[in-house]
Image (cartoon, rainbow, N blue to C red):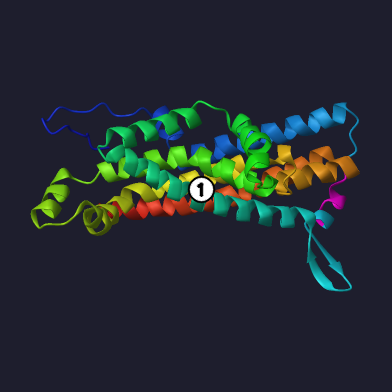
Amino acid sequence: MEASFTPKGVALPQPSAVQRFFASTLASVVIYAGVMAAIIYGSYAGAQNMGYNWQWSRVPQFLYSFTDDGFQLGEMIVGLGLTIQLSATAFALATALGLLVALLRLSGLIIGSAVAVGFLEFVRNIPLLVLLYLVYYVLGPIFGFDRYWASIITLAVFHSALISEILRAGINAVAQGQWEAAKSIGMTTGQTYRYIIMPQSVRFMLPPMFGEVVHLIKSSAIVSVIAVAELTTVGRNIISDTFLSFEIWFTVALIYMAVTLMLSIGVSMVERRYATDQ
């Protein structure tokens, strides 16, 4: 193996064989498989000690069914559809609100910065569950929105604080010379953002924004506490009717994992693409 050197010609220490092994893809796969196997075995052993009667054959009916009317989606897939719809709407609102907060912080106005910082500190220091209760039980009766919109507003407000920091970091990553060049040719602040800053900042924003989509989908499970009929709520209702606790929760977990893994693969592809473009 060839030695690596710093720009000043100093040899860098080479990783040991053990370090190279744990950094390899094979080690990652083995460790991941071992952890998953331990979780599955622990769950199975615990259920066996409880005398639990596994009934996996009853699970497919909650995913799909064939009736006289043809193929029908099961309750859990319908719940997943509502989860995705709720998450997509909340993400769109969170992005709009996050952009507003980020621009207020970057505006240079004392009042704008104070409002943005106050909003961020308020949201970041309140647990998501408490924020959900505040929106649904306090603001809901005042403004007249139902549990579905209370869920969307809660997720949008909570994640807008995170998204605003992503957007602000992306904007700040654009070289200062770009601002000066835009100003020198007579562009207004709005034109500078639209034509110069935002197009260049997209490459810095996209990977973490995709990651925030994954985070939001997982966070959406919290709305089950106010009985919004998304995936987690549907799973809980099925368990109350069938007592298939282990099977249903494993299935719910696998559905969430499948969705987030697909999104994570997309995030990785975006990150690789922009890494090669830089």
271 to the left or right of 226? left
Residue lying at the far front of the rendered structure:
142
252 to the left or right of 161? right
Q: Residues in magenta?
A: 54-60
Residue 222 at least partly seen: no
Where residue 192 appears, as percent x and y from the top left, is: 21, 54
Residue lying at the far bottom of the rendered structure:
69
Give 196 or 37, whichever is nearer the viewer: 196
Label 1: state its secondary structure. Answer: helix
Where residue 144 appears, as percent x and y from the top left, is: 66, 46
Q: Quadrant of residue 138?
A: top right
Give 243 or 5, whichever is nearer the viewer: 243
129 to the left or right of 186? right
Q: Which residue is at 23% across, 46% downward?
A: 174
Q: Quadrant of residue 43?
A: top right
Kind of residue at badge 1: Val
The residue indicated by pointer 1 is 213
Q: Which residue is at 18% across, 45% downward?
A: 175
